[in-house]
Structures are given as structure tokens and as C-alpha cells.
Amino acid sequence: MEKIKIYNNSQKANKDQESLAVKTLTVKMGIHRDLGLDSMANKPYTEDEIARVENFAEELATEKITGQLYTMGVPYEPERITSSVYAMATEPIAYSLFALDKQRGKATESAEKHRSVFTQQYLMPARLLVERLMANPSLATDELICHTAGITPQELAKARQIEAERNAPKGMMAMMMAAAAKKDQADNEPSGNGHPASAKMEKGPHGKMPAGMKEAMKKMGANMDPEKAMEMAKSMGASPEALKKMEASMKANKDTSTDASGKPAMAGKTEKPQGMSAMMAAMGKAPKEYSKEEVEFALAVAEVERTIKNVGNYKNALLTSPEEELSSLMNALKGGYTAPTPGGDPIANPNTLPTGRNMYAINAEATPTESAWEKGIALAKQTIDRYKQRHNDSIPRKVSYTLWSSEFIETGGATIAQVLYMLGVEPVRDAFGRVSDLKLIPSTELGRPRIDVVVQTSGQLRDLAASRLFLINRAVEMAAAAKDDKYENQVASSVIEAERVLTEKGLSPKDAREISTFRVFGGANGMYGTGIQEMVESGDRWENESEIADTYLNNMGAYYGSEKNWEVFQKFAFEAALTRTDVVVQPRQSNTWGALSLDHVYEFMGGMNLAVRNVTGKDPDAYLSDYRNRNHMKMQELKEAVGVESRTTILNPTYIKEKMKGGASSASEFAEVITNTYGWNVMKPAAIDKELWDNIYNVYVKDELNLGVKQYFEQQNPAALEEMTAVMLESARKGLWQASEEQVAELSKLHTEIVNTYRPSCSGFVCDNAKLRDFIASKADAQTATQYKENISKIREAKASGSNKGVVMKKEEMNQTAENQTNTLSNVAVGIAVIIVILALILFVRKRRKSSQM
């Protein structure tokens, strides 16, 4: 970073020289590969390229990574609690202050362009503030909020008013439900059981109350006592402005309800509404409209206020969550009520704390939410801009999207919003806030061609939000039929191309025309996954990637875009839909997983990438929609994301040491990442380079970081090391990794040593790949190879017998007598421990029952 600072501060005459200095270090560290930059020694990087290097380095320094696995019922260590609170609170404050400075014109261009400057000007001060608040939560006053945000108390009050009016329930039914919810919470929920950030939870839009109901309510409450009416209005969430109007209306009515002598006014004289009527008149008015700038100001201030006031709550919630989980479990077993909570990553969404509550989903009919729509537009524009930068200012013709239920719930449908905006179609909300209709965005307003899409859905999303899938395909049909566009209509062009392909494949012109607009696909026969992972990881079952692509197209080729053709499988339909695809997009909304650590990413995104490459002959660009920071969502290229994840996790000594504090499960996670790296190498070779494999080899086989890796795996989980070495050898055997003879020999030596010492674990890579077994044996000396083959044969024969008991017996025969005795003692100890736990639970439940009856 020091050389980049020198470059940023250098005079124009010295820029090229300083740029070359940055480039030399960038190439030495291999960062140029992750960013797709050139390595020519005499060609300076441009200012934009230097900025990319700087931002990548800053992301490495500030990336949020998970450490030792959480054990239910066991609180995190104090330093983990502290680091988690920093991760939850620092960025919301920093990005909100930056947003306020942008509104005031105070934000510098360098802070927006250079992450290191942003860190210095915003992140570091925000972190110091969080540190003070953790030490003394009582500092979270209005005075501190105003000082931090640089606003007056009046501006704070104004921001609160805007937020209250925007989030207040709209429509009588919504208000009555809100009032009932508040009453239930007050009557039934013990103090402290709500989550810490609930006061400012975003509420979805609601429609206005039907006029007929409004009139009926006016008549029904004509004689209601004004004080009761005011109280009811407050409980229903009426805005401050509505309450003022209502109070003024009732006061005016009181003044005119008697004449000067104090006698009742003359019959027939027009009366002002009173009681419930006044409330309905005030609340029935259209809510006040605020400018975009006012709303953005209120949102930023609300984020600062919410975070400052909840730093102490976040800490307490993390401390108490383990106990809350166990208490909630016992309470549920007694038939007690479990409070609801949104699910997901607490770093990205602190509303998930405390844990130990029932997770709820989302009203699919109200998606994409207004917030998700804005985010979707911004990310779709980023996708187009990134593609234009890489492809000489041309735009993508078609973009593929993966829809997952977790992202859909946590973002309110932001990926669906991207899909719609790419097509140049926007949602239309009804009186109840539901998105049941669409309209075309005029071509002149869109300012670009309509871009075609193709969507693959997971099984969970398909079950949760079928109506959204129908909406997407309707949007495709609308976009394809759009006339008088100022720009080329890529959707219409893609439909014509798909129809041509289907006709050439032998379909009738009628069927080809109908199927040419199919764009939403998923698992055949109601399948929930892609069904290709086992095939991908069984390298002896395929020789050419086209075999995997064909399987993927077959397994994921069911159409889910309409009720009429729900789950219909038409051969070639998915293939035709993939023609002209230039970009593949995958959502990522959690800090707990990445492209390497979660196998479903290579399964879905990688599978789509492989299918597109085999259909079009072109390897598409691959981007992740990164929703992890709600204040700074972005598109990130897959190769860059892999670089960040690998450098901050499996190649990072701090991360590795933290994981090594765990047991067998933590060891298995290392193996899973290596397996997923292999999966990506199959699906998108450009994402995994030789240097990554070399670095993995150096860390886990050569132990260049001197972490005692081999000893750790031998003590905790030898099977994980067997898996890792087998995967690396398979990558070399299939030519995915151009490993040297020395590397292959060293890997084979380590693999056979672990297998012969600890016996085969017999995962697919270790035991079931005949070609890999022969390859490994051919690299070992005769005696080692013979013993290796015998050990694997014994396990495979035991598995083939079909008797689980037989498998155990076979394994025990290969263990030493001392090990058998240890296992026997261990089983007895486990049995005693289980009995003790059961007795403890019985006593605990009895005690709780007695105390509850008191």
C-alpha cells in the first residue's frame, strides 16, 4: 500500500515510474492474475488499474472471515464477541456518514474511488466510535448521534419524522394489525425477548384503505370519545402529521359544536368530523411525499442512530444467544411460544440477534420490495458497466441469473429486480403493496437496449415464490414484444434466435415459437439440486466437459415460467434459451460462505457457466452479486472473489491457525474447500490458475508456513488429509493442475502414507475412482503400492457386502488391539455420558415445570 500511496501523491512527470513500481510488486504477489491485469514489465498500469489493485488490497485487509466453528450452548470468547460487534457496527456508521457527506458536497473524490482513503476517513473513525460504545453503551445519546452525523437536533427530529411516516402502516387494516401486534407484544412477550434492532425494522409498503371501508369506519366511530380516538390512532401507528391534523380537527369541532351562549349548535349546520371520524379523515389522507434527497438523508441518519444505540445490545445478544438457544429449545419442547426472527448472517443483518428464535420467510407477492428494486437497478447498471469495460464498450446480449431462496428472503428479491431491469420492465404495485403487474420502461428512459435474460431457480425458491417466476417470464414476453424502441431490442433478437435453433433441432414451427420465450428453468421432476456434483467429483466417469454440460442441461431443463407449462421438460428448450448468453450472475448475501467454501456455488453458477460455454462456444463473464454490505452492494468478478477468499482463508496463516483450534469438523472444512476448488477448475478453468494449486500444495503438503498442518490432521481428522491429497492428485491426473513430477511424487507419498497408517476413509475421491487409484499406485514404490491397494480393497469389499455391521468389523480388524480397546472404552464412556445427559434433561424439565406452577 505504501507504493500506491507514493503513486497517488506523485507528480504527473513521475507517475509512470511509480506505476511500474506498483506493478512490479503486484505481479510478484500474483494479484494481477486475480484482477485479470497484464504482467508486461515495461508497460505502466493506468490510474484505473492502480485503483483496482489498491481496492483489492484494501479488501484483503478488511475482509470479514469466519473462524472457529460455533458450538451450540457455548458462548464465544470475549475477543470473538468484540470482533463480531466491530463487523456488525463499523461499516453501517462509516457508509452512512459518507452518504451524508456526499449530500453536503463534502465527500472527496478520492474517498469514493480509493478504498484506502475511505478506510482512513470513515472506517477507522467509525471503529473508534464503536470501541467507545462497547466500553460504555450509555454514551449512545441524541447528543452523540448529532455530533457523529454532523446534524442539529432539529435535523435529527426531521429525519425521525420522515422515517416514521415512511414506515408507518398505511391503510386501516395494516394499522389495526400493527396495533394488535403491539398489544400482543406488550401482553405476552417478556421484557428483553425482542431483538436489539427491531425498533427500526424496515416495513414493506401497504396500500390505501378502500373508500367503502373508510366511510363505514367513519360512521361507526362518529360518537367515539376524542381522547379514545387519539389513543387508538397512536396505537395504530398514525404519523405525527396525521395526529396533529386529527387533534386540530377535533378541537375545531369542539369550538363549533356550541353557539355563543353555550347551547348546542343549530341542527342542520355543517359539523366538523369528530372522534373516529376525525381520525379517519386525518389518517385517510395521502401520506406526505418526500424528495429523494430527504429520504436518503433520513435513511443515513436512521442507520447512524440505530447502530449507535444498538452497539451494546449487539454485544449482549451475542453473549446471551447460546443460553437463549437452549432455553428456546426447552421451551419449544414444552409447547411454548417461540418468537419470530429473520434468518441469515448477523454481520449483514443484526436483526437476526439474539438467536434461538423461529426464522420466518417473506411475502413473495410483495417482491421485489421498493428497496430491492433500487438495489437491483444499481447492480444491473454495474453489471453492464463491468462488461463494457472488458469488451470494448459493447453491452451483454443476455445475462443468466441464479435465484436462491436465502438471497430472495434476505434482500427482498434484489436479484429478481436485476432481472426485470435488464429486460427494461418495472414492477407495478397494487393497493396492498403486492407486485402483481408489470409495465415497460420506455426505451428513451431506459437509455440502452433491452437485454435478454435466462434464469435458473433452486428448488427452494421455486416452492417459495412460484408467482415471481411467472412474473419473470411475463416480463420476457413483454420485452420481446416491445415496439418503437430507440435502441436495439436484444430480447426480441434472442427470441428469434431461439426459435431458429429449436426449429433446426426438429421442433414444429408452432412449438418452436411458443418455447422460444421460455426463460425460467430448474430441476426436472421437482429436483432440488442440479444432480451433477457426484459426476463432477467422479473424474473417472467423464473424459470431456461436454458430458457434464449435457447432464446439466438435462437435469435443469424443466420449465417453471407459467402455470400452464409448470415443470414441463422439452428437449432443447434450455439449450435454446442459453444461446447468446454473455454473462453469468450468482447472488452472495452472507459472510459465512464464498465461491470456494460452499459447493452449491460451483454446482449452480459453475454448472450454468459450463453449459453456456458448451452451447455458445464462448466462456461467459462470471459475476457475483455481493449483497453482504447493505450499504455498499456491488458486482464482483468470480476470479477476483476467488482471489480474495483464498488469500484471506485457506492461504492465510491467521485463518488456518484459528481453524486449527477446532476439531474434526474444522479439519473437514479444509477438505471441502479443496474439493470445491477442483469443482471450479472443471466448471470454469479460468477461475482457478496453476499458482493457486501450487500455493495450496505449499501450505498443506510442504507446510511452508510452519503451522504443523500434517500433525493437526493426523490428530484430528486423517480422513480430511486423505481427501485433500486425493483431490489434488485427481486435479493433476486430469490435467486441470499442471503439477510437476516432484509435486505429484510428494503428494502420492503423503497420500499413501496416511491411507496405510490410518486406513482409507473411502470417500469418492479416496476409494471409488479406479483411474485415480491406479495413478497414485503408479507413483509409489512397489511395497507401498501393494499395501495401499490392499487397504482400499478391504474397505471396498466390506462396503460391497451391503452390511454396515460388516463394514465396522472389517475396519476393526485392520486396527491394532490397543486401538480396539480404546474404542471399546470410548463407546462405554459415550454411553454413560448419554445416560447422564438424559437424566439431567429430565431433572431440568421437572424443575422447570414445578417453577412454572408456582
Image: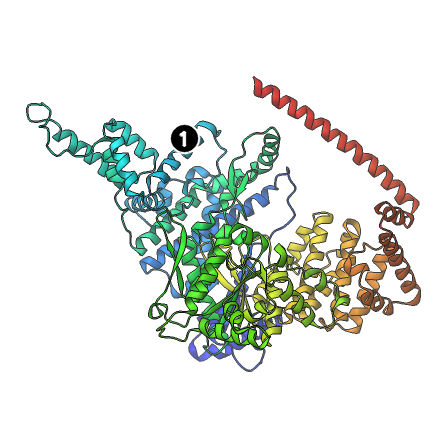
The relative height of residue 282 versus residue 738 in the rendered view (above or below) is: above
Q: Quadrant of the C terminus?
A: top right
Taking 667 as reference, is 54 left or right? left
Q: Position of residue 567 (x, y in %)?
A: 57, 58
Taking 654 as reference, is 3 left or right? left
Identify the image quadrant of residue 578: bottom right
Identify the image quadrant of residue 276: top left
In the image, 139 versus 630, the foreground residue is 630
The residue at the far bottom in this view is 42
Q: Residue at x 54, y 34 (%)?
A: 338
The residue singled out by tag 1 in the image is 183
Q: Residue at x 84, y 50 (%)?
A: 802
The relative height of residue 728 versus residue 307 in the rendered view (above or below) is: below
Q: Position of residue 579 (x, y in %)?
A: 55, 73
Q: Residue at x 71, y 68 (%)?
A: 694
Q: Secondary structure at mark 1?
A: helix
The residue at the far top in this view is 854
- Mark 1 residue type: Lys
Identify the image quadrant of residue 277: top left
Mark 1 neighbour class, 10 Å CA radius: few under 14, some 14 to 19, many 20 or more: few
In the image, 701 versus 187, the foreground residue is 187
Q: Position of residue 693 (x, y in %)?
A: 70, 67
Q: Position of residue 645 (x, y in %)?
A: 60, 60
